[in-house]
Amino acid sequence: MPSDALPGGTTATRFLKEKVWRVIDQAWPQQVAHLQALVRQPSVLGQEAGVQRIMQAIFREMGLEVHTFEPDIGTLKALPGFSPPEWSYRGRPNVVGIWRSATRGGRSLILNGHVDVVSPGPLSHWTYDPWSALVVGDRLYGRGALDMKAGVNAMVWAVRGIQEAGVQLAGDIILQSVIEEEATGNGTLACLARGFIADGCLIPEPCYRQVPTAQVGVLWGRIKVTGRSQHVGDSRAGVNAIEKMYLLIQAMRELEARLNRERPAVFRDVAWPINFNPGVVRGGEWPSTVPAECELEFRMAFYPGMTSEEAKVLIREHLTESARRDPWLKEHPPEVTFFGFHADPMTLDFDASPIIQILDQCHQEVTGVSLKPMASTVTSDARFFSTYYNIPVVCYGPNGEGAHGADEYVELPSVLEVTKVIAAFVIDWCGLSKV
């Protein structure tokens, strides 16, 4: 620790942490109200402006130095980790709040969280309105409550608790409220490209009492199949593009099964780490016409050790070889393209990472139990910090269920717990100013 920062393990530091935790407890009703306000904003892709106004407002209330900006494709597209979108960033800002240390003798820290959410899907599948943020017992329901507005809420109120307890840090805090983690990660990439970097990063993704030490890479792709239209009265004279797509979906299932049989040691405790998902299907124009075209949008994972470009080659070659087994597809091969997620995989060393070890110590202070390493079958923005910017990173957040599904909820006691752990971690990572 630098000479102008106090060590994190002293009795005085423990006293200050307990003071911060009491402030967090006292502010808990206001924190829950803030989380409800976030969840009530339907911040699906392209509609994040409303929730970002809430984030901008609370950053200003906290006296932070606030930066609001839209990602710039012209700047990002040449950077490692960029994922190609098929949409605009107009009116879709990131919001960054900086609390600068008076001494700057400690380590700086990024707290990064995404405010974009996926579609709620059919509303008839929900018990509660996905935008109501209804509290039922210890659960707060709503789309994005768990993934990951509760984590964003926790990181904000952890810092706010430190401020209101009068604790002065020796390192700068950079709070990043980003868009588009659910589709590209370009929101976080835009923050880093603009120079909002630090000595470490914590992302409060919902991996309760666990720390991901590996995560898969993820690609979004599109397969287009051409058939031959025909009146259904003579359907055998046509070629049903939807049925031909079935063959390619099955081919991707075969690749998925093969990769899961070949899983590396880091995923040995995960039964099925590689998941293929046929997510969106479009095909046909009329019930009585053999469909001439079918289009599938899919998500496919791949292991550490393979880049997104190598994974694209693997998928294309597999689909090409599979198509050759069908007479029609052999003569009319499918068109395979990729968009959105080009997310490379990532691995971390639980025991050798100082940022993970400090977080584990703070977690034990609050909960009495240690964090556990885990291998993640999904991606997160952590890859940008570790892989492209060499910034130590850790993911850690609250508990709940239903992410990307109906009746998503977060367990409120876990949000309070995580808020206290993050506060303790901020103090230990940044150090305390002697001022």
Image: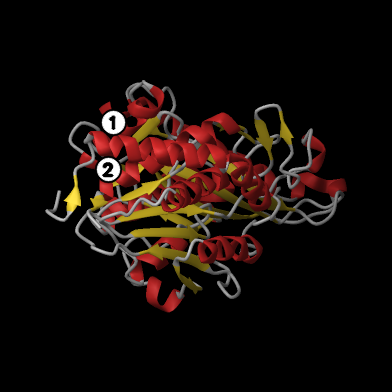
Residue farthest to the left, as pictured? 3
Q: Position of residue 22 (x, y in %)?
A: 47, 37
Residue at the location (28% across, 64% down)?
102
The image quarter containing residue 410 is top right
* Most foreground residue, 272 or 355: 355
For disc 2, the marked residue is 428
The label nearer to you, 1 versus 2, is 2
Element type where label 1 sits in the image: helix
Left/right of residue 92 with respect to residue 356 in the rendered view: right
Q: Is residue 251 above or below residue 331?
A: above
- How many C-alpha atoms fall within 10 Å of the one at disc 1: few (<14), some, or many (≥20)? some
Question: Which numbered disc flags the more N-terminal residue, 1 or 2?
Answer: 1
- How many C-alpha atoms fall within 10 Å of the one at disc 2: few (<14), some, or many (≥20)? many
The image quarter containing residue 259 is top left
Residue at the location (22% across, 35% down)?
9
Q: Position of residue 107 (x, y in %)?
A: 23, 54
Residue type highlighted by circle 1: Gln
* Most foreground residue, 352 or 298: 352
Left/right of residue 231 with respect to residue 37 in the rendered view: right
* Most foreground residue, 258 or 331: 258
Decide if residue 301 is in sight here.
yes
For disc 1, the marked residue is 361
Element type where label 2 sits in the image: helix
Q: Is residue 217 above or below residue 42?
A: above
Q: Is residue 355 above or below residue 46?
A: above
Q: Are marks 1 and 2 in contact (CB under 8 Å)?
A: yes
The image quarter containing residue 347 is top left
Q: Image quadrant for the C terminus?
A: bottom left
Q: Position of residue 149 (x, y in %)?
A: 57, 47
Decide if residue 264 is in sight here.
no
